[in-house]
Image (cartoon, rainbow, N blue to C red):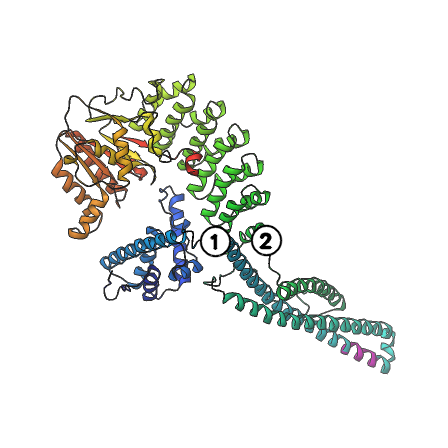
């Protein structure tokens, strides 16, 4: 691997060095880049709240803290995602004024380095997993203990800084009081002297002498309090030196790659609260009140200093044998990555301990979405009998992260099925303003409360929902959970006339349902018009059940519209099915080599039953993917939305004609909504010419395509998520 001049990439450079070089060119520190990431995350969150689709890899869920970036530069952090690299380089290129073509080259180089680093780490893990060199589990706990000690030292230093500032303010306040008392004593002495010389003022001598004695006693008390504060200041200075020594000693440890920043604490004290007019007209009553506050404050601070002294001087760490206490304490550390490591180790070694449950409930409020996701998964997996765990999952059903929300809903559906409180929480979500929240709530209700009248009524209230995806989910769920209910059958009849063909098809599945799963795959709508009519696998087909497409294929998949879209997240098996369909056709008609898990696709194709139209003979089956055009674009095509469309349809135009089947994997690529609608029109033109189109995609905007039927491929159950 070789670099070009000025790109910061030498033959032996790593991904971290490359990213740091780009940051240096833009003159951006790790903190600067973290702040710009946060700005982008806030902007993305605003767009999502306004109704935009949640991206597959949201910026807000990335780890972009300053400490993480520092570790990334040193190649000691977890590897970033492809989109993280795009966002990072987008920031640096924008600030540095990099030309768009140059920016694309940098992104490609970053991806090459990312792939190389992944391979390197895979080889490293393979070597480290050999019996001769695998590390004992105690090392994880020892590392966490080191980080605990480091953060404890940081916090002790921070508390000492605050306490020293407080003593300085308090000493200044006491000097104010002492000076005010000197002025009062001087004034009273003058009054007494005047009384000795003037008999007219002799009557007030007794009062003046009492005031002087009182002022003198207050002055003595103030000086004593000042000495207490000064002694505390000297002790704090000594403790500060010791804390600095502890911190430096820990920072030299090989496992410490950086010193984490603590969250912003309270501002340093400016002054002790005194009456506003104290400095202009202090009276003995005000001074007495101020001295009372000072004494109370001194008593409290002296006890706090004793605690600090014990922390700094004794510095007794948790014993390694007390693994549980170390792990629980480590889940409170500042660094999110360390908290995650501690949590995973805690779940591995102490999954059913009550302290683990309490820790998980606390972590549902963690700032890191991946930690909240782990907490949701673990509460559902291990604590289904706990009301406190249920309530924590109810809280997470409104989480900002879609993955966390879905896991919480699935956990409630599986772990607390038939629980009234859990059901009512999901019923409430069906009235949420966000369509994605309503959809997840519907899925949870059908999974955990099929047949329940309250859950049924919540779904029936959504049959005229404004979001087509929600209506489609409602139709599928009513069929799955309440198909024999008379009210549901009436609702399905209504939905069978919906404007969306996907909703109509889902509703008619219930109206025409057979007792045999996957039977009667061909429906009246579109029967006999396409080249490929339907596919399914036998109920006893042995496949990877962790891939949701296999469960869907056991129920049968019918292709009864000109355009059929297999819609789902990455890993659900869309491409596996598309590859298998390509395998079913004569290989001489397949336009591009298969990608993805070819072995699984071939296994699926061998066991899959396909129904072809006996009246039509395929004259061409073309299997095209976005990677095919990515390769072409680096050779002869410029990038950009217009050229992306041109690439697709210059190829498709060559192949179009009656009796053609197109298998398209992610054809929309980087297109925006407007460009996607142009593509929808062009695909419908292909259908009008006698072609059939089957699409695999993660983009939810396919539900907006007129005439297309969307088949959603989901991870519907928690058991699949656990796998």
Is residue 476 toward the left or the right of residue 106 in the image? right
Would you say residue 512 sits in the magenta stretch? no
Q: Name the image quarter holding residue 188.
A: bottom right
Count of labels in the image: 2
The x, y position of residue 290, in whole percent, is 72, 65
User: Which is the main secondary structure of the residues drawn in magenta?
Assistant: helix
Answer few, some or many: residues within 10 Å of disc 1's Cα (few below 14, many 20 plus, some between 14 and 19): many
Residue 273, given in percent of the width and then of the height, sits at 66, 64
Q: Is residue 269 above or below residue 123?
A: below
Per the image, the residue denoted by label 1 is: 336
Give the quarter of the figure containing the C terminus: top left
Q: CA distance from mark 2 to mark 1?
A: 24 Å
Q: Is residue 275 above or below residue 208?
A: above
Visible in this render: residue 573?
yes
Identify which residue is drawn at 31% across, 20% down. Answer: 519
Residue 436, compared with residue 481, is above or below; it is: below
Q: Residue furthest bottom?
A: 197
SS assignment at label 1:
helix
Q: Earlier in the sequence, mark 2 or mark 1?
A: 2
Q: Nearer the viewer's eye, disc 2 or disc 1?
A: 2
Position of residue 694 measured from the top left corner of the image (x, y, whole percent): 24, 33
Residue at the image position 66 percent from the left and 73 percent from the top: 234
Question: In this picture, is 527 found above or below 235?
Answer: above
* Residue 705 place in picture, x, y as percent: 26, 34
On the question of residue 267 being in view, the answer is no
Q: Which residue is label 2 attached to?
A: 321
Q: Quadrant of the N terminus?
A: bottom left
Query: What secondary structure is found at the residue carrying circle 2?
Result: loop
Q: Which corner quadrant of the image does residue 675 belong to?
A: top left
- The boundaries of the magenta stretch are 186-194
**Foreground residue among 316 and 279:** 316
């Amino acid at each position: 691997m070789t670099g070009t001049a000025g790109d910061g990439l030498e033959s032996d450079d790593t991904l971290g060095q490359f990213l740091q070089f780009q940051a240096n060119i833009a003159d951006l520190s790790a903190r600067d880049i973290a702040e710009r990431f946060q700005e982008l995350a806030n902007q993305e969150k605003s767009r999502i709240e306004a109704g935009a689709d949640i991206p597959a890899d949201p910026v807000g869920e990335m780890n972009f803290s300053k400490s993480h970036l520092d570790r990334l530069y040193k190649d000691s952090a977890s590897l970033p995602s492809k989109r993280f690299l795009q966002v990072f380089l987008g920031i640096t290129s924008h600030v540095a004024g990099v030309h768009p073509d140059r920016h694309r080259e940098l992104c490609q180089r970053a991806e090459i380095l990312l792939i190389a680093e992944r391979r390197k780490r895979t080889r490293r893990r393979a070597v480290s997993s050999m019996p001769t060199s695998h590390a004992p589990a105690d090392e994880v706990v020892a590392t966490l203990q080191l980080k605990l000690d480091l953060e404890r030292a940081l916090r002790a230093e921070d508390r000492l800084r605050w306490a020293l500032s407080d003593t300085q303010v308090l000493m200044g306040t006491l000097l104010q009081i002492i000076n005010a008392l000197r002025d009062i004593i001087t004034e009273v002495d003058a009054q007494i002297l005047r009384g000795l010389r003037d008999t007219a003022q002799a009557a007030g001598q007794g009062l003046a002498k009492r005031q002087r004695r009182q002022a003198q006693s207050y002055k003595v008390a103030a000086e004593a309090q000042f000495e207490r504060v000064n002694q505390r200041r000297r002790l704090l200075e000594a403790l500060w030196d010791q804390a600095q020594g502890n911190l430096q000693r820990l920072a030299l440890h090989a496992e410490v790659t950086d010193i984490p920043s603590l969250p912003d604490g309270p501002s340093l004290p400016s002054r002790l609260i005194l009456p506003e007019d104290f400095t202009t007209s202090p009276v003995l009553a005000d001074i007495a009140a101020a001295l009372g506050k000072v004494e109370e404050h001194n008593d409290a601070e002296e006890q706090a200093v004793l605690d600090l002294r014990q922390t700094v001087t004794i510095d007794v760490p948790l014993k390694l044998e007390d693994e549980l206490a170390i792990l629980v304490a480590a889940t409170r550390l500042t660094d999110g990555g360390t908290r995650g490591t501690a949590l995973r180790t805690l779940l591995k070694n102490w999954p059913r301990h009550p302290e683990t449950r309490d820790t998980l409930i606390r972590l549902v409020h963690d700032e890191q979405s991946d930690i909240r996701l782990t907490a949701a998964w673990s509460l559902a997996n291990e604590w289904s009998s706990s009301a406190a765990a249920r309530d924590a999952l109810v809280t997470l059903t409104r989480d900002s992260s879609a993955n966390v929300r879905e896991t919480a809903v699935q956990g409630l559906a599986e772990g607390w099925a038939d629980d009234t409180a859990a059901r009512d929480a999901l019923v409430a979500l069906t009235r949420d303003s966000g369509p994605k929240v309503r959809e997840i709530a519907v899925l949870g209700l059908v999974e955990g409360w099929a047949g329940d009248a309250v859950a049924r009524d919540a779904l029936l209230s959504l049959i005229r929902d404004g979001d087509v995806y929600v209506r489609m989910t409602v139709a599928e769920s009513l069929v799955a959970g309440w198909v024999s209910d008379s009210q549901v059958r009436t609702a399905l009849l209504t939905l069978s006339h919906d404007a969306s063909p996907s909703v109509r098809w889902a509703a008619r599945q219930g109206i025409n349902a057979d007792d045999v799963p996957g039977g009667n795959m061909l429906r009246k709508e579109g029967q006999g018009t396409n080249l490929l009519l339907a596919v399914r696998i036998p109920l006893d087909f042995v496949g990877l059940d962790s891939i949701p497409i296999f469960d869907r294929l056991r129920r049968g998949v019918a292709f009864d519209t000109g355009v059929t879209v297999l819609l789902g997240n990455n890993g659900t098996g869309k491409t596996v099915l598309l590859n298998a369909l390509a395998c079913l056709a004569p290989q001489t008609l397949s336009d591009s080599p298969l990608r993805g898990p070819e072995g699984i696709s071939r296994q699926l194709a061998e066991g899959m039953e396909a129904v072809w139209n006996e009246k039509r003979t395929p004259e061409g089956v073309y299997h095209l993917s976005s990677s095919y055009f990515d390769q072409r674009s680096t050779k002869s095509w410029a990038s950009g939305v217009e050229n992306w469309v041109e690439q697709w349809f210059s190829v498709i135009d060559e192949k179009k004609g009656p009796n053609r089947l197109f298998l398209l994997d992610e054809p929309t690529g980087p297109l925006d909504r407007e460009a996607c609608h142009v593509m929808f029109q062009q695909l419908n033109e292909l259908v009008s010419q006698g072609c059939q189109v089957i699409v695999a995609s993660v983009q939810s905007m396919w539900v907006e395509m007129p005439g297309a039927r969307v088949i959603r491929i989901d991870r519907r159950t928690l058991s699949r998520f656990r796998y």
